[in-house]
Amino acid sequence: MDVTRNQRTISAPATVEGVGYWSSRDVRLEFRPAAIDTGIVFVRGDLPGSPRIPATIANRTETPLRTVLRSGAAGVDMIEHVMAAMAGTQVDNCEIWVNQAEMPGCDGSALPFVEALQKAGIVEQSAKRAKLHVRHVTRLGDERSWIEARPSWSGRTVVQYELDYGGGNAIGRQSLEILLSPRFFHLNLAPSRTFMLESEAAALQAQGLGLRTTFQDLLVFDAQGPINNVLRFPDECVRHKIVDIIGDLALAGCDLVGHFVAYRSGHRLNGDLVRAILAEGEAGQTPLKRCA
Ligand SMILES: [Zn+2]
C-alpha cells in the first residue's frame, strides 16, 4: 500500500571514520540531526566558514566512476554510498559534517553508514515527505548501457539491474529485481561492496589512486573470483549496482516512486535520469513539496 510517510531524521549525532579510496586521506564523517525540510546537506567543517553543500541534483558535477557534488568553491566526493544509506534507511533530514572532501571508503559498502544511522536512532518528524510518481516511460543511454524509469503499478519503488561484464572473468552477467524497503535495503543491499577487475585496480593504482586501499577494502576480481576476499552474496556485484542507483536517485530530494530498469548503467546515466524525472514532475504534477 502506498502510504505517504513522515519525514525522518536521527535523534543523536553518529560518526564514521575511514580513508578515502581515491584521495587516500583520513576522513571523519559526522551525521547530525536536522530540522524538517532541511534535506541532506554536506558541511565541509574543515574549510573557512564551514560551507554547506546540499545533496541535490543541481549540485552534481560529472566525474568518472563516482558521484561528486559541488557548491561554489566547496565540494564533496564519492558520496553515493552515503546517499544510498540515507535513502535506504529513509533519513530525509541530516547534516553530514566532514573534514575532507572524500567520504570514507570503509569496506566499499553502505553498511557502515546504515549501522551508524541505526545506532543513533531514526525518528519521525511532524511533516510529510515529498514524493514524486513516475508517470511516463523515460529511457536514457544507448544499446551498450541504459536506464529507464516507468510508472510503478504497485505504488512501490522497484529497481531492476542487469550487469554484464562479458566472458573471461568471474563477474560475468548478473541480474536482480528488488522491491525497495528500509528492511530489505539494510539486510540485502547495504552489505554489498564496490567491485572492480584486477586490471581496473592496477590502472587506478598506476595513476597514484587508491594507494591505501587493499583487497580487503573492496572486491577486486581475477579470473577465479575475489582476490583475498569472500563474497557476502553470490550476486554481490549486481546488488552493489542497485545500491549505487538508490544513492544516485536520492539526489532528487524526494521519494521517487517508479519502476527503474537498468542495463550496465553508471552514475552519469543515473544522474541524468533524475534530472529528466524532476523535469517531467514539474511539468505534470504538484508534489507535496517541490523536489530538489
Ligand atoms: Zn558504488
Image (cartoon, grey):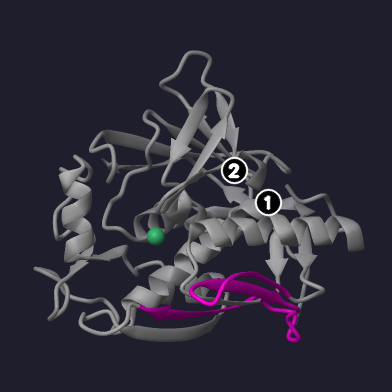
Q: Nearer the viewer, residue 103 or 92?
A: 103
Residue at 21 percent of width and 46 percent of height: 210
Which type of secondary structure does the marked residue at label 1 adopt?
A: loop
Q: Which quadrant would residue 94 be assigned to in this image?
A: top right
Q: Position of residue 40 (x, y in %)?
A: 60, 44
The residue at 51%/26% (across/down) is: 74
Looking at the image, which residue sits at the far front?
Answer: 143
Q: Are marks 1 and 2 in contact (CB under 8 Å)?
A: yes
Does the stretch in magenta take in 65? Answer: no
Circle 1 sits on which residue? 253
Q: Which residue is mark 2?
A: 55
Vertical placement of 64 versus 84: above or below?
above
Q: Residues within 10 Å of mark 1 (few under 14, many from 20)?
A: many
Residue 148 among those drawn in magenta: yes
Whole-percent x, y for residue 152 in the image? 73, 81
Looking at the picture, which amino acid does disc 1 mark? Gly
- Which residue occupies 53% across, 82% down? 178
Q: Return the x and y of residue 229 as percentages of the image width and height.
A: 14, 70
| Vertical order, 252 against 161 (above or below) | above
Residue under the image location 42 percent in, 72 percent down:
189
What type is the residue that disc 2 sits on? Ala
Q: Is residue 209 left or right of residue 122?
A: left
**Front-lying residue, 170 or 158:** 170
Where, quadrant-wise, is the N terminus in this rendering?
A: bottom right
Q: Quadrant of ligand 1?
A: bottom left
Residue 167 is situated, as x and y percent measured from the top left of the image, at 26, 85
Residues at marks 1 and 2, CA–CA distance in whole angstroms: 8 Å
In the rendered structure, the answer to whether residue 42 lies left or right of residue 23 reads right
Q: Is residue 233 left or right of residue 260?
A: left
Specify whether 223 is left or right of 106: left
